[in-house]
Structures are given as C-alpha cells and as structure tokens.
Image (tube, rainbow, N blue to C red):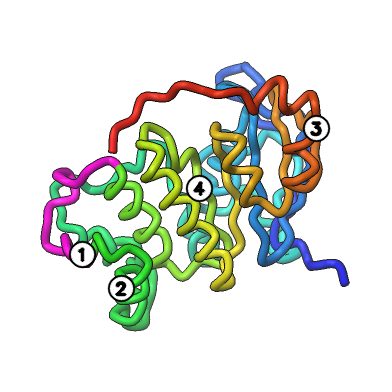
Amino acid sequence: MAKNNILTLDNLYVSYGGIRAVKGISLNVPEGEIVTLIGANGAGKSTILRTIASLVKAESGKILYQGEEITGKSSTAIVEKGITLVPEGRRVFANLTVLENLKIGGYLRKDKLESDIEWVYKLFPRLKERSWQMAGTLSGGEQQMLAVGRALMSKPKLIMMDEPSLGLAPIIVNDIMNIIKTINKEGVTILLVEQNANLALKIAHYGYVCETGNISIEGTGAELLNDESVKAAYLGKSKRKANS
C-alpha cells in the first residue's frame, strides 16, 4: 500500500533579490520515511527547507502538509503544526546551558517537557553528561547533537535537517547518521539536505538531485547510489574540514 505524503511541494518558485533560487520544484515526502535532497552548493536545497519553514517567502507554487496548504503561514504556525528545522551551522544558544537550549525547543508546548528531555538524553547520552554546560563550550559534534535534540523538543512529525554533517569528523558523522535513522524508526519523518551524498543516500528511502534550482533526477536511495550520472557528479571522495 502506498504511503500518504506528509509533505508535497507543487511547482514551487522562490527568488532572492531578483535571482530565482528555486525554479518550479515539485516533490513528495511520504509519511514515516527519510527523503534526501542532494546537490552542489547553490543548487537551492537550503532555500527549499527555509521556504517550507516560512523563513523565506515563496514566490509562487504550493506547500502542502498533511493535505493542507501551508504556503505563507507564519514560522510559529509551521512549528505548531509539527514541522521543525535543524539549521545549517547548528546555531545553538551559546550562552545558555544544554538543558536551557532543550527547553527553548519546546517553548510552544503547553504540556510538561520532562519525558521528552529524557528521550533526547537517551538518544544523546553525551548531552545528559553536559546538561549544565554552556552550549558554546561544546564540541562541534556535541552542538550538532544539541541542535537536533532541541528540534525534537517541539515533538515534530516532520523534521528537516540542513547539512547535519558539515564540518564534523567522520566518526561523528556516522553517529549523526545513525541517530537520524533511530529518530525515523521512532516515527518521525525526515527531510534531509546533505552534501555527503553517499551517506545520505545510504540511509534515505528516496532522494532528489537538485541542480540550479531544479530537480534533475529522483529515485530510491539505492537507485541514485547506482546511477552513473549521480556517481560521477556527487559520489566521489570529498575533502571537508573536520571540526568535532
């Protein structure tokens, strides 16, 4: 049986200062799956996530979430509906503790946060060990864990992640990818933007290749891993500065 799409983009256009960054993209994110967007820098991947999160305004087209159009709704309304974004560069609150950062992630909730804080600590034991440590003093990998944990505190149905492996050592990247799979197994749908195309496609159920604001190729993670054009363009060894 086909799964319902939790998110659909229909002919989405987005422009920055007269430059069109997203050019009529349409895609689906099935409920309960990991979907990845891969592509070079400047392909429009991050813009897509930021537009869904209502941090950037769509020029035209539709964004549908659980069948309801959410194009143009406020960022707060997007979070309340169950969508959250882990931004590129982590952006934790450096002068607050780990625990305070997590509590900020649940700021729109009316219920108690304790059980979900414990869930985040179970996913990331290192955060529990450092719960009273200032977030700005954490390593890069720990800050990425905190950024993901903070996003989970809003109890999202759909979590979007923008370059979660950027700047991290390979061993930490593997930890983050395993956590993404664990979160997905616990029922959270994931839309992942990731330059490490090889790792992203290995964990993704489905993938889209973005090129200059368009979708050029799509398919299952396995299909894209074995596609010769994808191999040539995106699956070569890349050297990225590690900062774990």
Q: Assign a secondary structure to mark 1.
A: helix
Left or right of 115 on screen, residue 49: right
* Amino acid type at image mark 4: Met
Q: Position of residue 16 (x, y in %)?
A: 57, 23
* Amino acid type at image mark 2: Ile
Which of the 4 quarters of the picture holds residue 57?
top right
- The mark total stands at 4
The image quadrant where one finds the N terminus is bottom right
- Which one is earlier in the sequence, the residue at label 4 or at label 2? 2
Whole-number angstrom distance, CA of label 4 to CA of label 2: 20 Å
Q: Which residue is mark 4?
A: 161
- Which one is earlier in the sequence, the residue at label 2 or at label 1? 1
- Does residue 87 sit above or below 17 in this rendering? below
Question: Which residue is at 17% across, 44% downward?
Answer: 136
Q: Which residue is mark 2?
A: 117
Label 3 packing within 10 angstroms: few (<14), some (14-19), many (20+): few
Question: Which residue is at 37% across, 32% downward?
Answer: 167
* Amino acid type at image mark 3: Asp
Q: Which residue is mark 3?
A: 227
